[in-house]
Image (cartoon, helix red, strand yellow):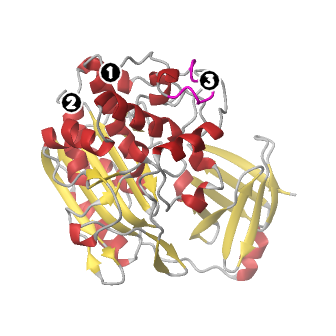
């Protein structure tokens, strides 16, 4: 439910990946060091052609009671829920309960531009409807119950950010509305629709629409690592996200779901092709996740302190599902490790050993930097023993020390290399390099 960040993996189009047996030893090494260094709590499942190849769980469901997670522990999966909701809508379309060109005014005429917004626009984020989770006020009520009427008012009051179908922008509001539309066309509650149409047919024993966390049901609390320890996060009341982010599941069930989806057990090949068709990087409840010359499909999710990724490679019939209830190490890197372990590509298991640098050296890196190659300036500041970077018009982000001269922001794939003597800084991102000079 937090702002979606589409994760782009390493792309080398000329490189031909060939599958091999999964290197489980490499994954064991990664999970062992993440557990030891408190970098990750959660679980992973890797399956191929429906067969479970690897499953691992580390960390705690509840820090206070020291209750450990296991491979069947359940997590809030955030926006991966959108894959389920999109599937339900396409299932309804196949039964002629709805059409993708139906306009929103049939259901919610109070929404701005409702007569122009189609069901397909909602599915691929081309509606223009403002995402309510982008508002500062959202943080004040996220843990409070909201009725359908209350949520519709919040979404309607948010108005539109652009004309329908003129461009694309991720909006949780779209899928909350789709949840209510599903309830209307199926004449049932979202949780019951999900159970009848997807969960029971696929025999998903650990998947359901969530409620308040129940440890006795093998569910997990979520955490953020703050001030050297795991701190429990507030719980979003799932009446708010509905089918945009309210489902609870685990990696093994998620692997079963996406494998069934691509095997034609839920919708037709024609409907799946619609889901996979990208329009400005958005499919119908799906995204592309490139890895070398391979294209994977899936979705990621984040809600409270939970983070999840679910992807499927159609050529290999390979699925990777990762759910976390606490992470410092980016899930994107865990996913890359899993894919590298399958395709036999190099992946260095991090040590997470801290690199100590003198305060004087950190001070020498601080300052304002500009480049002749790109317009934004970057400000480097020091707080305590940590550096922060902030590009023009953007929020500041923390830098992790990789070496005395190299710093990283893993979530965005940013590497900064400093040369204090020359008053220079090199920014590396996405295979490109940009030279900055200290002003």
Q: How would you rate the neighbour count of disc 2 (Cα within 10 Å): few for under 14, some for 14-19, many for 20 or more?
A: many
Q: Which residue is mark 2?
A: 266
Q: Quadrant of residue 270?
A: top left
* Dominant secondary structure of the residues highlighted in magenta in the image: loop
Secondary element type, mark 3:
loop
Q: How would you rate the neighbour count of disc 3 (Cα within 10 Å): few for under 14, some for 14-19, many for 20 or more?
A: many
Residue 142 rendering spot, x and y as whole percentages: 52, 58
Q: Which residue is mark 3?
A: 113
From the viewer's perspective, tell me whether residue 201 is left or right of residue 217. left
Viewer-side residue, 237 vs 314: 237
Q: How far apart, in angstroms, are the residues tagged by discs 3 and 2?
A: 32 Å
Viewer-side residue, 10 vs 149: 149
In the rendered image, is residue 350 in sight?
Answer: yes
Q: Which mark is residue 273?
A: 1
Nearer-N-terminus badge (2/1) = 2
Q: How far apart, in angstroms, are the residues tagged by discs 3 and 1?
A: 28 Å
Q: Is residue 111 magenta?
A: yes
Q: How far apart, in angstroms, are the residues tagged by discs 2 and 1?
A: 13 Å
Quarter that holds the C terminus: bottom right
Viewer-side residue, 153 vs 163: 153
Nearer-N-terminus badge (3/1) = 3
Secondary element type, mark 1:
helix
Q: Nearer the viewer, mark 3 or mark 2?
A: 3
Query: Measuring 47% from the left and 57% from the top, which residue is drawn there?
Result: 145
Residue 359 rendering spot, x and y as whole percentages: 72, 81
Q: Quadrant of residue 116?
A: top right
From the viewer's perspective, tell me whether residue 438 is left or right of residue 26. right
- First to last magenta residue range: 108-116
Q: Quadrant of residue 193?
A: top left
From the viewer's perspective, tell me whether residue 339 is left or right of residue 138. left
């Amino acid at each position: 439910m937090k702002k979606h960040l589409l994760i782009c993996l390493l792309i080398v189009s000329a490189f031909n990946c060939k599958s091999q047996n999964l290197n489980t030893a490499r994954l064991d090494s990664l999970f062992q060091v993440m557990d030891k260094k408190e970098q990750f709590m959660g679980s992973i499942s890797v399956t191929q052609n429906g067969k479970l190849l690897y499953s691992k769980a580390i960390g705690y469901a509840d820090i206070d009671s020291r209750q450990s997670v296991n491979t069947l522990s359940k997590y809030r999966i955030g926006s991966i829920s959108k894959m389920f909701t999109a599937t339900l809508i396409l299932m309804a379309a196949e039964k002629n309960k709805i059409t993708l060109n139906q306009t929103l005014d049939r259901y919610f005429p109070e929404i701005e531009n409702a007569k122009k917004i189609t069901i397909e626009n909602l599915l691929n984020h081309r509606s223009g409807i403002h995402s309510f989770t982008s508002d500062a006020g959202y943080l004040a009520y996220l843990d409070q119950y909201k009725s359908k009427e209350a949520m519709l008012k919040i979404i309607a009051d948010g108005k539109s950010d652009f004309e329908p179908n003129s461009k694309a922008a991720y909006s949780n509001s779209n899928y909350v509305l789709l949840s209510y539309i599903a309830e209307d066309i199926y004449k049932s509650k979202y949780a019951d629709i999900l159970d009848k149409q997807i969960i029971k047919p696929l025999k998903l024993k650990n998947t359901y629409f969530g409620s308040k966390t129940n440890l006795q049901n093998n569910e997990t609390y979520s955490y953020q690592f703050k001030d050297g320890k795991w701190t429990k996060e507030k719980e979003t009341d799932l009446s708010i996200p509905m089918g945009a982010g309210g489902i609870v599941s685990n990696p093994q069930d998620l692997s079963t779901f996406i494998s069934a989806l691509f095997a034609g057990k839920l919708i037709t090949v024609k409907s799946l092709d619609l889901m996979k068709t990208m329009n400005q990087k958005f499919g119908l409840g799906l995204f592309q996740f490139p890895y070398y010359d391979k294209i994977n499909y899936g979705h990621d999710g984040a809600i409270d302190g939970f983070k999840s990724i679910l992807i499927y490679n159609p050529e290999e019939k390979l699925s990777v599902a990762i759910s976390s209830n606490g992470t410092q190490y980016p899930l994107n890197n865990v996913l890359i490790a899993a894919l590298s372990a399958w395709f036999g590509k190099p992946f260095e298991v991090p040590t997470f050993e801290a690199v100590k640098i003198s305060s004087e050296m950190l001070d020498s890196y601080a300052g304002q930097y500009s480049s002749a190659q790109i317009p934004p300036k970057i400000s480097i500041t020091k707080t305590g023993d940590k550096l922060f970077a902030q590009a023009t018009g953007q929020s500041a982000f923390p830098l992790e020390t990789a070496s005395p001269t190299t710093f990283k922001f893993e979530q965005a794939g940013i590497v900064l290399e400093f040369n204090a003597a020359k008053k220079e800084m090199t920014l590396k991102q996405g295979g490109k390099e940009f030279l900055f000079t200290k002003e």
